[in-house]
Image (tube, grey):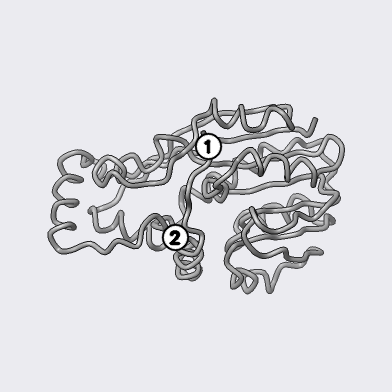
Amino acid sequence: MIKQLINKQLICERFRKSLKTYNSHATAQTLINKKLIKLIPSSLEAKKIFEIGCGTGILSRLLETKFSSSEFVFNDLVYESKRCFNNFSANHSFAMGDIESIDFPSNNNLIISGSALQWLTDLPMFAIKASNALTENGLLIYNTYGTDNFTEINTITGSGIKYPSIENIKKSLEDKFEILLLESENITLYFDSPLEVLKHMKNTGTNAISREKWTPCDFNNFEKEYTKLFHSSKGFSLTYNPIYIVAKKK
């Protein structure tokens, strides 16, 4: 029901290429990361934190400010992400690789992830691994994306990953976790042209869906449809649909 085929090699390639441009273009992701920080209970004593999909470290540095004395373990599919942590002062180490293949570090009080777990192929198996890696009453806090995510792109091209519904997320987690929060929102960005939309996706690595190359005719059709369907006085829209999850280990 929630399993799907994802090209992890393509994801790695696209995000590696976007490392230098990501921070200046990740408007929605930065807003999401700030919300994730706010969702962490003030009472949480996080001696050890495992962040999945650390990327360029936007969420990591927010965590460092909040938990300066904690031990951090960072994960990312892109090995070169390590370079973004040269000035990270808190105690930290890395567990790099595909989160669905590597072993999780143990005894974490908090497992957290921003805008990375939409690439999972097996959410129920992830829930088992996360639960086993948490201490008693440990928390899993993350966002994925819902069915409205990039609805403009999906409507025109018919391509995109299969985003889970809130009900499917709940079913995948509830055996191992008590779900404390499960909610979604829409974040809409506006651009000057359909081309700028595509550039935004390239600069943030979120175009890791297909290797298919467009012809000039393909792009002209895309631009025409985008203008007809998704242009307003604000510009050309692109919708992010983050789903936020806070769950406590049973």
Q: Is residue 38 found left or right of 10 in the rendered image?
A: right
Nearer-N-terminus badge (1/2): 1
Q: How crowded is the residue under tag 1: few (<14 C-alpha within 10 Å), some, or many (20+)?
A: some
Residue 106: x %, y % from top left: 83, 52
Residue 186: x %, y % from top left: 43, 35
Kindly identify the residue that appears in the image at 62 percent across and 59 percent down.
98
Residue matched to label 2? 205
Amino acid type, residue under disc 1 in the picture: Ile
Q: Is residue 49 found left or right of 86 in the rendered image?
A: right
Amino acid type, residue under disc 2 in the picture: Gly
Kindly identify the residue that appears in the image at 83 percent across and 55 percent down.
70
Kindly identify the residue that appears in the image at 26 percent across and 42 percent down.
234
Residue nearer the viewer, 11 or 27: 11
Residue nearer the viewer, 18 or 129: 129
Inter-mark Cα distance, 1 to 2: 23 Å
Disc 1 to disc 2: CB gap under 8 Å: no
Kindly identify the residue that appears in the image at 47 percent across and 68 percent down.
13
Residue 124: x %, y % from top left: 64, 38
Numbered disc in front, either 1 or 2: 1
Residue 164: x %, y % from top left: 49, 35
Q: Is residue 26 found left or right of 219 in the rendered image?
A: right
Residue nearer the viewer, 153 or 125: 125
Q: How crowded is the residue under tag 2: few (<14 C-alpha within 10 Å), some, or many (20+)?
A: many
Q: In the rendered structure, find residue 102 and report the number of the disc placed on it.
A: none
Identify whether 203 is placed above or below 50: below
Residue nearer the viewer, 237 or 168: 168
Image quarter where the C terminus lies is: top right
Tell me the element at label 1. loop
Residue matched to label 1? 2
Tell me the element at label 2. loop
